[in-house]
Amino acid sequence: MELKRLYESLRRQTRKDFIWLIIDDSTTEEVKVVVEELIAENQIQIEYHKLRHRGKHWAVRTGDQWIKTPYVVDIDDDDELTDNAIEVFSDTWNKIEQENRKDIGMVCGQTVDETGKNICYHGWKGEYLDTDYITMEWSQRHPSENIISRRAEAFSEAHVFCDDDKWLYDKVSLVLESVLWNRVARKYKARYIKDTLRIYHHNDQDSLTRRHFDEQKCLNYTFSNYAMLNELRGRLLENPRDLLKYVAEYMTCGKALKIKNQELLAHLEGSLLKTIALIITPAAALVANRLCQNLNATDYDFSNNIL
């Protein structure tokens, strides 16, 4: 079980003054049984919470209320930390506090995959780089699988979970992480460091973002792209390639769900997004028709959720 691999990496940490907060929204009792066995070993401090199954986003949102430490490292159960990850994060945060850098809310470490290949940008000069997530990922086009430690209050201070009553939100199981980190970036800067702190394991069968498109994934992508595109207004042209990509995903997934074209356009803010969406519509319709063969999509009535 992948959870045990993560546990072993936590057990090997050179610093053990942390709490492993496990938020379980699985549909079986298997995780609970395994966690009880790990707690009984009494090797590290573990806190376990079982939730009704709604998806990763709701687990992260609900779990945020149980954080007791000043800093948080978010990691999936199928990944693992390098042995010194907690120590490096702790030392980096200590330096940030000594510098009185209250403007820094994230520390981003390097990630390698299971073959040892680095999958993060690290091409800056010097020990670290202070910038913000939007500039790094969007404007400078360095999308990376960084392992991120954040201030415990970062999500609440940045109003990351601000989507209640928004169009489609009650139907999603996953809001793409870039949406959440973009929101943090409007409040805080990030310190990027060159230490390798995470091992990422490719798992195409279980990954929410790599699996084939189905109805739920289309809902997740439609909402995530709607939120991200509207919130990037003013910086959209800093990355024309991804701008086209995300508008295309938004229109394609929306049309696969049989949301009317005029409704999709109505939820995009500004003439630039609406114009690009109109141009992309014919191609999006063709791709959506192929997706619909696998989705069994229903005709949703979203009229009560229009902003």
Image (cartoon, rainbow, N blue to C red):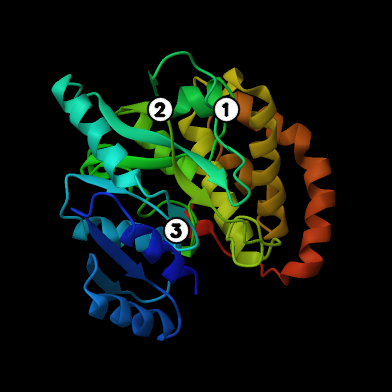
Circle 2 residues within 10 Å: few <14, some 14–19, many ≥20: many
Residue where numbered disc 3 is placed: 76
Q: Are marks 3 and 2 in contact (CB under 8 Å)?
A: no
Task: Tell me the tag on residue 102.
Answer: none
The residue at 65%/31% (across/down) is: 242
Image coordinates for residue 227, horizontal then vertical, percent: 49, 42
User: Of the residues shown, which amino acid type is indicated by label 1?
Assistant: His
Q: Please say whether residue 193 is visible from this viewpoint.
A: yes
Earlier residue among tags 1 and 3: 3
User: Of the residues shown, which amino acid type is indicated by label 3?
Assistant: Asp
> Which residue is more in the foreground, 5 or 228?
5
* Distance in Å between CA atoms under marks 1 and 3: 22 Å
In the shown orientation, is residue 292 left or right of residue 18?
right
Circle 3 residues within 10 Å: few <14, some 14–19, many ≥20: few
Earlier residue among tags 3 and 2: 3
Against 138, residue 211 (above or below) is below
Residue where numbered disc 1 is placed: 142
> Which residue is more in the foreground, 215 or 180?
180
Task: Tell me the tag on residue 192.
Answer: 2
Image coordinates for residue 75, horizontal then vertical, percent: 41, 54
The residue at 62%/46% (across/down) is: 264
